[in-house]
Image (spheres, grey):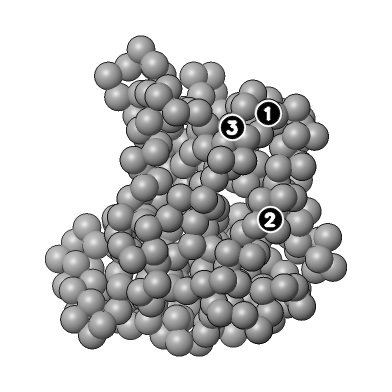
Amino acid sequence: MVTMEDVRWLPDALEIRWLEALDEPQRNVDWDAEWGRMVGAGTCPPLIRLWRAAHAPGIGVSRKDVAHPAGEAARRQLMEEGLSVVVRDTGGTAVPQGDGVLHVSYIFPRPRARATTDTFYRLLCGPMVDWLQTLGLMAGTGALPGSYCDGTYNVLVSGRKLVGTAQAWRGGLAGLSSRHPGYVLVHACITVTADMATMSGWINRFYMLSGQSYRVDPALAVTLDELSAGPWRGTDAAEAARMAGERYAEHLTAWLTSQGVRVVRA
């Protein structure tokens, strides 16, 4: 999946670290942008952030989902009903949130030469597909109409969606010489252990309340816990996501190192 042309867009060195605010749902999401601005300004190195969704169950929506009054009203209604509804910078439609959901965010300086979103999606998804295959899973990427946050770079296992992805580019092309130095954020949402029927219902309710016809089919979603008898099976949901993240970080570190990237586990 990852080409030699894609690899040239990897930074020479980066950090992989856990950064999470599990009791502050919106801040937990907003850290991607905060660290993105620092990466863009060169005050911290390129970063791969591992983080779990906050303990509060709910959904994550894009800014366009709440850019109109009906969307904002739907968000307020769900929050009044006790759900968390966080707003993320990347595009796409709503995704599940809560214990058992793991996120991986690549936060890199915005390239000064021409690059494509496909390049960064492949850099995100390629190692993840490789890792899943080491677990004996038939993984690949592709669209799956009816799945939550559908896109070309869903990570699918046996025809069901395990990972949703999204991307955002911020700032100017001028890099460090710009008043608003840019960064690329490409992000994966992995359902390690979760009640996808319930979470899909929350997503559908949000879009129903906001007056949109978009709906998701819970039968198209799957969790890592369903697919693989790893150490995460049978454990507390938050801890299961942590275990899966640590295992993936080990694989990703080895993969990046094999591509000539200097990796620091911070």
Q: According to the image, label 3 marks what residue?
A: 14
Which tag, 3 or 1, sits closer to the chain's start? Answer: 3
Compared to residue 183, the image places residue 113 above or below, namely above
**Is 22 on the left or on the right of 143, as rendered?**
left
Q: Secondary structure at mark 2?
A: helix
**Which label is found at residue 10?**
none
For label 3, the crowd category at 10 Å Cα-Cα, with few meaning under 14, some 14 to 19 and many 20 or more, is many
Compared to residue 179, the image places residue 254 above or below, namely below
| Residue for point 43% across, 55% down | 20
**Is 99 on the left or on the right of 141, as rendered?**
left
- In three-dimensional space, the C-alpha distance between marks 3 and 2, rounded to whole angstroms, equals 16 Å
Which kind of residue does numbered mark 2 sit on? Answer: Tyr
| Residue for point 48% across, 62% down | 52
| Residue for point 64% across, 65% down | 243
**Which label is found at residue 248?**
2
Q: Place residue 21 in its image quadrant.
A: bottom left
**Which label is found at residue 262?**
1
